[in-house]
Image (cartoon, coloured by chain):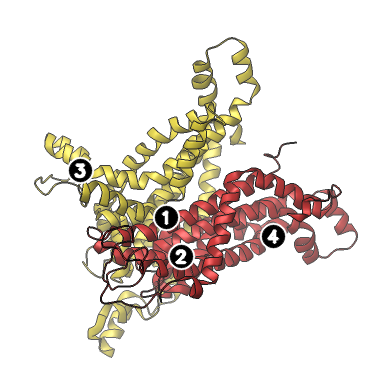
């Protein structure tokens, strides 16, 4: 197992380096000179330009600049935002918990509904229920989630007035950030009203972000359930006279879960991509909205830093998924 | 289909086609999908004749007119008008041209380049394979929409950059599939026979191997077509794709957003047509997979 882990880690190194090269190249591929970009519309004098150029190290060779960038990266230094002048790392870290909280709720929503739906569809294969569940999940899978979000806002917020439209918590509450998770922070503060408010604000965004993962999980659960249901050991279990419920839950589902867990893990990249759209619609103050704002304000260091950090997160999660898969399914290790 | 009227001999291309068609048309969903796609393609192709209005024409006397089934609706604007008095139905019809043609280009580019790189990687193995797969891993490390956004920021927002960005994001899937299929086929007898009879690298790659690796690639092409429609619309929605006043579906949604409370139709219909198109392509893709995947095939 340890060797498996080392191999996986070693395979990650080139990708890691590749990601840093892409991020390094990002600023240099932009149309226009970064210093002129930073100077903005006021322009810049030739002396100041030369001074900034040597100060920022743009007069050195690309290799030296890249190594310098790597060194900064290893120290958690991603440069400063052009807009707020705060370190990109701090900006990112202050917003990441919001995205993580939303993603976890969305994933929970997707698993809690998608898993039973998939099992049900597999058990009722070919029946109306199966067709209905699969039809609904194919629709969910095809959903333009930015439109889905707008529809739900129109229905539940504008027409029915049930849910709030934007933000993380009602403006009536101020919660001191400790973990950055609004739900946990409000519990730490002991404010029950604030906790309920933060849950209230999470409902619609979680549904919107969770829709596509839900569909993927339901489809995957159904197909791996069907695969396992055809195995000899399931037939044996039935022949032993075990109840249908026990055969499904213990003998089939447990084995079917191996591939489902992998698929759930692989949703993380999808969730982060979906978070960009969901956060834009609901004005959720996470990294998705931050990246969109950074791109539209041409705050390139923030875009660069965000790209690197998000890619790192996705890679690490994928590594963990690989490892988890190795733990659950020993056949894969070799 | 007239091709099925006379039974063809097993093993011939015509037999394969007939057997594929009978598998494909066995799924009602796949047929519905196919019919819808053909319908929307025709509508897009004949947009100037089908659309009741010019998509850019602004009728100042008819701002935010509701659809025809409302009391205030008008037969002239079946699905209502937007905030500057443009006919929504006509804009959707013209929008189909953009969504479908850009997505088709995305699939052509990423499938073409992906097949080429995948063939190289699977055929030559060694360092060629290592370099290609590692580069694809890097592309996959970024969430697709984010990478597309970053690329569009570099290339400046617009139709072409959106197309290139989304094609690049789709590329790894084609490379991986082609590579895996080539590795699976490479040591089969027919390939060895072809090599022994003196076929060169190019002939082996493109004439011998590629046709036998196409099944999963065709399925992936439909998947990537529907993903491309969604991504183009998402970029348009975020203001990074096709620029207004071009009637692109995602951009129409973005424009309609501020009138969400007063004019639901301006928001509902562009999204509905995106959903329907993507859903129908996916239905067709599921049918294709069932018909082409030998594992699923009834023996």
Q: Is residue B38 left or right of residue B205?
A: left
Q: Is residue A145 above or below residue A65?
A: above
Whether residue A78 is visible to the viewer of this picture, yes or no, is no
**Corner quadrant of residue B94:** bottom left
Say which chain tag 3 marks.
Answer: A
Q: Can you identify the residue that label 1 sits on?
A: A311
Residue A33 visible in the picture: yes
Marks 3 and 2: in contact by CB < 8 Å?
no
- Asked if residue B214 lies left or right of residue B152, the reply is right
Q: Is disc 1 placed on a helix, strand or loop?
A: helix
* Residue A26: quadrant of the picture: bottom left
Same-chain check, marks 3 and 4: no
- Quick check: A279 left or right of B16? left
Q: Which residue is under mark 2?
A: A22
The C terminus of chain B sits in image quarter: top right
- In which quadrant of the rendered image does the N terminus of chain B lie? bottom right
Is circle 3 on the same chain as circle 1?
A: yes
Q: Can you tell which of label 3 and label 4 is closer to the viewer? A: 3
Q: Residue at x 22, y 57 (%)?
A: B261
Of the numbered discs 1 and 2, the one sitting upstream in the chain is: 2
Residue B119: give its label: 4
Between discs 3 and 1, the one toward the N terminus: 3
Q: Colour of chain B?
A: red
């Amino acid at each position: 197992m340890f060797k498996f882990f080392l191999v996986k880690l070693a395979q990650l190194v080139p990708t890691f380096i590749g990601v840093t090269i892409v991020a390094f190249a990002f600023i240099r591929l932009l149309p226009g000179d970064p210093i002129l970009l930073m100077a903005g519309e006021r322009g810049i004098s030739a002396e100041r330009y030369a001074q900034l150029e040597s100060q920022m190290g743009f007069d050195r060779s690309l290799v030296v600049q890249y190594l310098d960038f790597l060194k900064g990266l290893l120290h958690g230094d991603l440069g400063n935002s052009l807009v707020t002048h705060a370190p990109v790392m701090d900006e990112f870290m202050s917003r990441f918990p919001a995205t993580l909280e939303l993603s976890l709720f969305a994933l929970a929503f997707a698993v809690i509904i998608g898993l039973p739906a998939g099992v049900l569809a597999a058990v009722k294969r070919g029946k109306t229920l199966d067709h209905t569940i699969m039809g609904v999940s194919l629709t969910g899978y095809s959903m333009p989630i930015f439109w889905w979000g707008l529809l739900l806002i129109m229905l539940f917020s504008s027409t029915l007035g049930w849910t709030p439209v934007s933000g993380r918590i009602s403006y009536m509450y101020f919660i001191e950030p400790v973990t950055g998770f609004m739900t946990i922070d409000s519990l730490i503060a002991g404010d029950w009203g604030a906790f309920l408010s933060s849950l209230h604000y999470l409902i619609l965004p979680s549904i919107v972000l969770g829709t596509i993962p839900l569909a993927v999980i339901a489809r995957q659960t159904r197909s791996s359930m069907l695969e396992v249901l055809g195995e000899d050991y399931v037939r044996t279990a039935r022949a032993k006279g075990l109840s249908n419920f026990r055969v499904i839950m213990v003998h089939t589902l447990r084995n079917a879960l191996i591939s489902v867990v992998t698929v759930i893990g692989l949703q993380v990249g999808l969730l982060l991509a979906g978070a960009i759209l969901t956060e834009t619609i609901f004005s959720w103050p996470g990294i998705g909205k931050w990246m969109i704002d950074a791109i539209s304000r041409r705050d390139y260091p923030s875009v660069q830093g965000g790209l690197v950090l998000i890619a790192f997160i996705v890679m690490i999660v994928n590594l963990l998924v690989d490892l988890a898969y190795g733990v659950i399914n020993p056949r894969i290790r070799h | 289909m007239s091709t099925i009227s006379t039974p063809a001999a097993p093993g011939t291309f015509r037999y394969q086609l007939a057997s594929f068609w009978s598998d494909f048309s066995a799924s009602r969903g796949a047929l519905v999908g196919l019919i819808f796609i053909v319908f929307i393609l025709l509508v897009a192709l004949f947009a100037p004749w089908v659309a009741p209005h010019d998509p850019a024409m602004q009728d100042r006397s008819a701002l935010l007119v509701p659809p025809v089934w409302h009391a205030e609706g008008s037969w002239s604007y079946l699905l209502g008008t937007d905030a500057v008095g443009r006919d929504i139905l006509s804009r959707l019809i013209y929008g189909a041209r953009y969504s479908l043609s850009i997505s088709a280009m995305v699939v052509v580019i990423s499938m073409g380049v992906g097949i080429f790189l995948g063939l190289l990687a699977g055929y030559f193995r060694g360092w060629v394979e290592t370099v290609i797969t590692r580069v694809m891993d890097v592309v996959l490390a970024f969430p697709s929409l984010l990478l597309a956004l970053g690329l569009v920021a570099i290339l400046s927002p617009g139709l072409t950059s959106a197309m290139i960005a989304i094609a690049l994001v789709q590329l790894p899937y084609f490379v991986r599939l082609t590579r895996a299929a080539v590795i699976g086929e490479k040591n089969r007898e027919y390939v060895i026979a072809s090599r022994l009879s003196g076929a060169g690298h190019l002939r082996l790659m493109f004439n011998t191997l590629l046709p036998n690796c196409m099944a999963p690639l065709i399925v992936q092409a439909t998947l990537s077509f529907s993903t491309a429609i969604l991504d183009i619309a998402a970029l348009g929605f975020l203001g990074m794709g096709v620029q207004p006043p071009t009637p692109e579906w995602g951009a129409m949604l973005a424009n309609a957003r501020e009138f969400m409370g007063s004019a639901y139709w301006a928001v509902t219909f562009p999204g509905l047509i995106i959903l329907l198109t993507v859903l129908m392509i996916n239905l067709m893709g599921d049918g294709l997979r069932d018909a082409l995947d030998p594992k699923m095939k009834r023996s």
